[in-house]
Amino acid sequence: MEFAQILDDVSSIARQAGEIVMRHFAAPTPTETKTSRIDVVTAADREVEAYVVAELARRFPDHHIVGEERGGQGAPHEGARHHWYVDPIDGTVSFASKLPHFCTSIALTTADRQPLLGVVYDPTRRELFSAVRGGGAFLDGRPLRVSGTAELVDAVVASGFPYDKHTNPDNNLREWAAFITRVRGERRLGSAALDLCYVAAGRLDGYWEKDLKPYDTMAGLLIAREAGGRVTGYRGEPEPQLADRGRYVASNGLLHAAMLEVLREAAG
């Protein structure tokens, strides 16, 4: 496959998706709930996903496409050598609340979920993060590199909370409390894809979160790794994206062992 051309095409698709997102962002945004009262969807999510899926299916008719809102589309899952993972708006709660922090995430993977190409576009800042496996990570064409922070006490980290946080005792509060006394700063920004890209860009030194779906993370995972970062499960598992509801730890690599230790302590 000619990844350079595919990356150009997907970048254009992501930017156009961003135009759709921002058109909706400027208007009132009614929401509907999905799995819980805090798991919401908007007309913008559906329109953006329909656009991205149609563009991918037109260019790659033999690829399977997984979208957050409509599930599997395009070629049948069985037999498709390449799969796309699309999150039309990662950060829908922020989008619906008119908080300008959300993105569109598009990733190409093998059938066994090994990421090959990833694009994450933040339309509010007009920032496009991208990576091709083995080719490095970039922000608007400029190379990205993770931070050099070597001690947790100097680190700024981010996390998020699951949609069932109101009813599930395993809701990340223990982990959040464990980190807050050990780091310089702790942030909850609201977009897993952007959190992973911010690790890649050195804006964050680390990030962890549970119950993430492959469409949330596949592009950002590749971008973080290609920028020199490390991404694992909570116990150091090397391929967290293989789980349908994964637990992810991303770091600049230097802090990874310390972050895993905090998570182990929090788990008891």
Image (cartoon, rainbow, N blue to C red):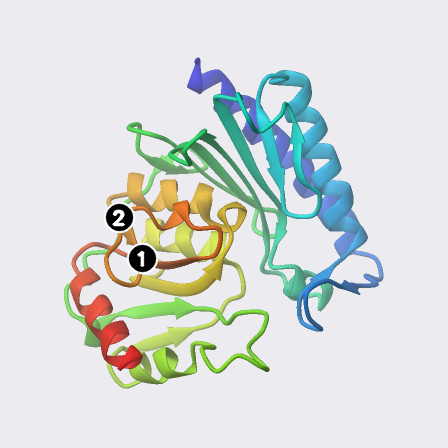
Q: Is residue 85 above or below residue 99?
A: above
Numbered mark located on residue 58 in the image:
none
Q: Quadrant of the N terminus?
A: top left
Q: Position of residue 202 (x, y in %)?
A: 31, 55
Identify the element where label 2 is drawn.
loop
When asked about the image quadrant of residue 253, the answer is bottom left
Q: Which mark is residue 233?
A: 1
In three-dimensional space, the C-alpha distance between marks 1 and 2, rounded to whole angstroms, equals 7 Å
Identified at 54% across, 65% down, the residue is 190
How many other residues sit within 10 Å of disc 1, few (<14), some (14-19) or many (≥20)? Answer: many
Q: Are marks 1 and 2 in contact (CB under 8 Å)?
A: yes
Q: What residue appears at the point 19 percent right and 72 percent down from the top-left corner?
A: 261
The residue carrying mark 2 is 238
Tell me the quarter of the picture where residue 141 sits. top left
Q: Is residue 248 above or below residue 189?
A: above
Q: Secondary structure at mark 1?
A: loop
Amino acid carrying label 2: it is Pro
Q: Looking at this rendering, what residue extends furthest in the front direction?
A: 78
